[in-house]
Amino acid sequence: MDRSPYAIGIAGGTGAGKTTVARELTESVGEAVTMIPLDNYYEDLSHLDMDERREVNYDHPSAFEWDLLAEQLETLLAGEPIEMPQYDFERHLRKPERVTVEPSAVIVLEGILVLYDERITDQLDLKVYVETDADVRILRRIRRDVVERGRDLEGVIEQYLSTVKPMHEQFVEPTKKRADIIIPEGANRTAVDLLQEKVEGEIEG
Ligand SMILES: Nc1ncnc2c1ncn2[C@@H]1O[C@H](COP(=O)(O)OP(=O)(O)O)[C@@H](O)[C@H]1O
Ligand SMILES: Nc1ccn([C@@H]2O[C@H](COP(=O)(O)O)[C@@H](O)[C@H]2O)c(=O)n1
């Protein structure tokens, strides 16, 4: 690789549409873009049993292994491959296997607190915050968590009120001021088109 990859961070509340924006970007530009979900860097909690893991606050910054993420992002930006951890939402567990991620022209890091830690933000070339109203986000989250993450309605509501909402207000939303671009309502066609143009420009050099 001739030059360092271009690193984009996409932050925002749960259900805001971060993954959707990141996926639309990566699908349009193909193999030149690598997606890194922050969720894969949840701390390894295999020493806790399932009941204990259910009680963890997954929206507090301390839930993530920032050292590993900062180190692996630096490695990718230096043009070296990484062994990225994988996450199992149904069991609240880091999976035993890792996947090899090769460096590419553009790296997209996506997750609720991607603009929280300076060791990460210092490495990002473009910082994006996806802003979507809380009522829309919780409705999207209920559907997604029940269909894709093995949760029930009562559990999603309880978790939202006890940790997700207060942590969003305390830690996630304040990171918006660090963003270069704020995208309203997630997969906003015009905003995604503009991001695609930017990414294609970076790939072509
Ligand atoms: N602009 C949108 N309009 C309608 N539904 C959307 C939009 N963006 C995302 N969704 C849906 O909302 C849910 C959560 O989106 P996702 O991108 O996973 O959010 P996040 O990664 O921010 O938690 C998904 O089921 C997705 O299909
Ligand atoms: N075991 C876990 C780990 C995380 N969560 C929730 O995931 C949300 C972040 O993912 P998004 O795709 O929604 O950005 C976060 O709000 C955590 O509450 C979980 O429920 N269980």
Image (cartoon, rainbow, N blue to C red):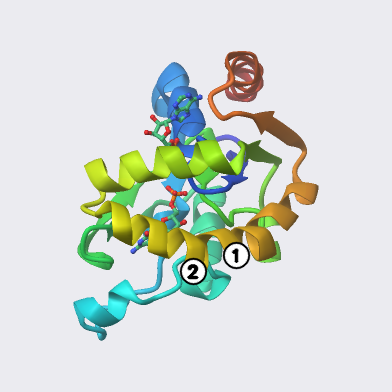
| Label 1 CA crowd tier, 10 Å (few <14, some 14–19, many 20+) | some
Q: Which residue lies at the image location 58% right of the left edge and 39% below the top edge?
A: 5
Q: Position of residue 84 (x, y in %)?
A: 35, 57
Q: Which residue lies at the image location 64% right of the left edge and 57% below the top edge?
A: 172
Q: Using the rendered image of the protein, determine whether residue 4 is visible from the camera's viewpoint.
A: no
Q: Position of residue 52 (x, y in %)?
A: 28, 82
Quarter in which the C terminus is drawn: top right
- Tell me if 146 is positioned left or right of 176 in this view: left
In the displayed structure, 46 sits above or below 31; it is below
Disc 1 marks which residue? 166
Q: Who is closer to the viewer here, 92 or 82?
A: 92
Kind of residue indicated by mark 1: Pro
Label 2: which secondary element: helix
Ligand 1: image quarter: top left
Disc 2 marks which residue? 162
| Label 2 CA crowd tier, 10 Å (few <14, some 14–19, many 20+) | few
